[in-house]
Every structure is written in structure tokens, then in C-alpha cells.
Amino acid sequence: MKMLTLSLVPALLMGLTACGGGEPALVFSGDVTQEWEAARANGDADAIAALHTEDAQVMPPNAPMVEGRSAIRAYYRNVFESRAAPARFDEREVIVFGRMTYRQGIYEMEMPNGKREYGKFMQLWKSVDGKWQLHRAMWSSSEPLASTAQADDAASPSG
């Protein structure tokens, strides 16, 4: 069985290389992530939306998925109008595979109430007509969730 498995690896690699059609490997530039971070820092929903694919999906924590460039523009407009917060992103891993690039890391965000939120993020970038665009994005806080009892107490009129 080992012999069969080992002999399949070179065949698979040759097949994958042949599928590439001899195209040069794509390089993911950090410039596009800097553009995204600058658009976010400037509260520019139009610039952020332009950096997404037409069929992009943004998956914010504790909220429904946001699908499509125009919905993403509206989502970020709302975020920037209600609670824009300065953030710092620390990229921890970038993996380029074909026309897709996976990027993940951690973030620190200053919330409007003065507290700091620490969390993690994942992004999937896609090369569309030679330009890298954000295709999928999700993030979440690293803070533990409040227990249901604490949440119920806070919501009650006497709490």
C-alpha cells in the first residue's frame, strides 16, 4: 500500500503542474492588504467595497453573512457611521495557492467606549483579471462570551 501511495504522489504533482497551463506563479503583494487597512482606517466604505470581488462574503461575528459588493459597501457604511474604531492588524500567515491567497492573523481594535478588543481574522483573496480582491473575510473577538445568566441580568429592568 505504501508503494502505491508513494508512486501516486509524483503522478499527482505532474498532473497539477500540467493543469497550470505553464502560467507563472502568482505573487500576493502586501500592497493590497495595506490598501484595505487604509480604507478601513479612513472609514471609506466605497474603497473597501471596491477591494472585494462581486460575489464576496463577509462574515462578521454574531451577525448574518453579508453577500455581494453592494451589501458589503452598505455594511461598512453602517459600521463606520455607528462605531468606527482604529485597529491594528498583525499578519501571522499568508499562503498563496494558485489564484487564491489565504491570510490570517490577529487584530487589536480600540472600541468607542475606550476598551480594547483583541481578536483574530481570516481572509481569502482571489486574483480576478490580474488584480487581488478580497473574496471571503471573517473575524471574531478573543474575549470570552458573557454567560447567559449575566446577559439576562444585564437585559432585565432591575439589572
Image: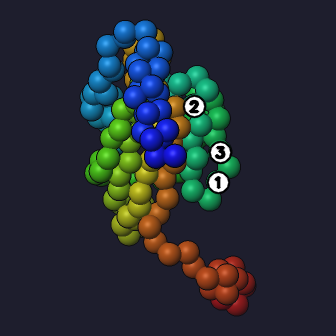
Residue type indicated by callout 1: Ala
- Within 10 Å of the Cα at label 2, are there few (<14), some (14-19), or many (20+) other Cα atoms? many
**Residue sitting at 44 percent across and 14 percent down?**
18
Residue 130, image x and y in percent?
Answer: 39, 13
Residue type indicated by callout 3: Met
On screen, residue 11 above or below 64: above
Asked if residue 87 lies left or right of residue 72, the reply is: left
Please state which of residues 22 and 122 is positioned toward the viewer in this rendering: 22
Residue 127, image x and y in percent?
Answer: 43, 21
- Within 10 Å of the Cα at label 3, are there few (<14), some (14-19), or many (20+) other Cα atoms? some
- Mark drawn on residue 63: 1
Point out the tag, 1 or 2, that comes first from the N-terminus. Answer: 2
On screen, residue 131 above or below 116: above
Instruction: Examine the rendering and report whether any part of residue 159 can be seen.
Output: yes
Q: Secondary structure at mark 1?
A: loop
Point out the tag, 3 or 2, that comes first from the N-terminus. Answer: 2
- Mark drawn on residue 56: 2
Asked if residue 148 lies left or right of residue 107, the reply is: right
Residue 50, image x and y in percent?
Answer: 47, 23
Between the residue at mark 1 and the residue at mark 2, the CA separation in whole angstroms equals: 16 Å
Q: Quadrant of residue 96?
A: top left
For disc 3, the marked residue is 65
